[in-house]
Amino acid sequence: MEDGHALVDDVRAAARRHNLTWSTLVPDRFTINHAAEAAEEAAYAEMAVAKRALRDHICRTYGITVEELASLAMP
């Protein structure tokens, strides 16, 4: 089983990479750099995989469903 802290670190690192590629794709609100689109899509997909791994770990560890996990984030 993977360590939860490592999975959180993976999500944070993937989010940072996605933020960088997004900033390259959309450097300002008036510009879209179409040459950066593939890199941004790849970074987004990488972040989605990391988030899924963390969600799966949390659900497996605590015996809850994704729906139950999502409800915990709501007031």
Image (cartoon, grey):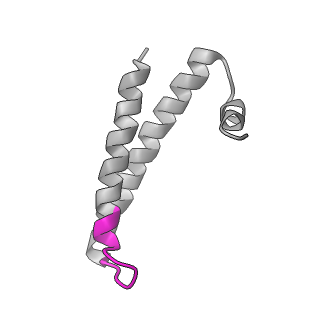
Is 40 part of what is drawn in magenta? Answer: no
- Location of the N terminus by quadrant is top left
| Rendered position, 2 above or below 39 | above
Q: Where is residue 63 in the image (x, y as percent from the top left)?
A: 66, 17
Residue at the farthest front position: 75
In the image, what residue occupies the spot 32% across and 49% down? 16
- Location of the C terminus by quadrant is top right
Q: Where is residue 33 in the image (x, y as percent from the top left)?
A: 30, 77
Answer left or right for 28 relative to 52: left
SS majority, magenta = loop
Is 32 part of what is drawn in magenta? Answer: yes
Q: Where is residue 17 in the image (x, y as percent from the top left)?
A: 30, 51
| Rendered position, 47 above or below 60 | below
In the image, what residue occupies the spot 29% across and 58% down? 20
In the image, what residue occupies the spot 72% across and 36% down? 71
The part of the chain drawn in magenta is: 22-33
In the image, what residue occupies the spot 39% across and 23% down? 5
| Rendered position, 10 above or below 43 | above
In this view of the protein, which residue sits in the foreground, 35 or 67? Answer: 67
In this view of the protein, which residue sits in the foreground, 17 or 28? Answer: 28
Answer left or right for 49 relative to 59: left
Q: Position of residue 39 (x, y in %)?
A: 29, 61
